[in-house]
Amino acid sequence: MNDRSTAIIFDFDGTIIDTEWSEFVTVRQEFRRHGLDYKLDDFRLKVGRADHRHWSDELQDELGPRDDIEEIRARRRRAHTDMIAGTDLRLGVLDVLDGADRRGRAVAVASSSPLRWVERHLTERDIIDRFSVLATRDDVTNAKPWPDVFLVAAERLGVDPSACVVIEDSYNGVAAAKAAGMACVVVPNRVTAASDFSAADAVLDTLIDFPFERFGL
């Protein structure tokens, strides 16, 4: 573990706000409309990645090509947007941001989601100015579980990857952080709780009382 950590890098979806549960529930609703099942175990494997097949393609694998697939996608997007509207920050996020400010530590976001999605939700919750860098899948060819988006964040922060502590919620996010040579703290959510986090440096129930000192922050 690096004893000179100088920066914190947050994942976004499922870490800052819990968008993952809504994503799963609203996709499952579309499958159930057509008499099909959509398993949480299958969805969990995709969390944190941007290179998996789209759920609507999987739906068409079962049903065959659909003339109304764009309508189905749009309906699902609306349901997801409505479900997460006003969703609170996950417990302890503000505590970490405040602690980083007091310690003079830089803070970034590194996400497998597109920039427009991340900016929108950080802006709506009035915390976008708390992050000096936003790195997203728009910045890389390979998103998580490859390390690229974390390395972009570190480069933009002007710090060595080994001086960064990542906060994640998913197996794929942990894999990406460790591949980048960074320490990684996991705070699982309802979707990812059953994942294998043995590669993480710490697994927490919440971000309250985040162990800054343990990571040299």
Image (cartoon, rainbow, N blue to C red):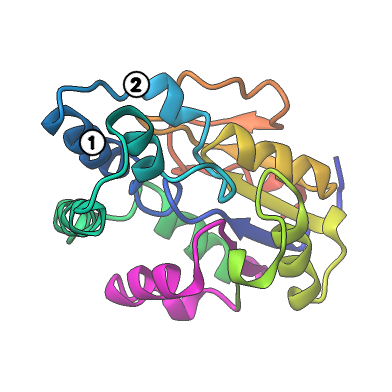
Front position in the image: 35 or 147: 35
Amino acid at the residue labelled 1: Val
Q: Tell me if 78 is positioned left or right of 121 in this view.
A: left
Q: Is residue 192 visible?
A: no
Span of residues in magenta: 103-132
Front position in the image: 159 or 214: 159
Q: Tell me if 212 is positioned left or right of 44 in this view.
A: right
Q: Is residue 207 visible?
A: yes
Q: Residue at x 64, y 31 (%)?
A: 202
Question: Label 2: how many residues lie within 10 Å, few (<14), some (14-19) or many (20+)?
Answer: few
Residue tagged 2: 39
Front position in the image: 34 or 106: 34
Image quarter hosting the N terminus: top right
Residue 108: say if magenta. yes
**Residue 89 x, y percent position in the rendering:** 32, 55
Amino acid at the residue labelled 2: Lys
Question: Label 1: how many residues lie within 10 Å, few (<14), some (14-19) or many (20+)?
Answer: some
Tag of residue 25: 1
Q: Tell me if 22 is positioned left or right of 197 in this view.
A: left
**Residue 53 x, y percent position in the rendering:** 50, 42
Q: Residue at x 38, y 41 (%)?
A: 55
Vertical arrangement, residue 39 with respect to residue 31, above or below: above
Vertical arrangement, residue 186 with respect to residue 199, above or below: below
Label 2, label 1: how far apart the Cα atoms are: 10 Å
Q: Residue at x 71, y 68 (%)?
A: 153
Residue 193: say if magenta. no
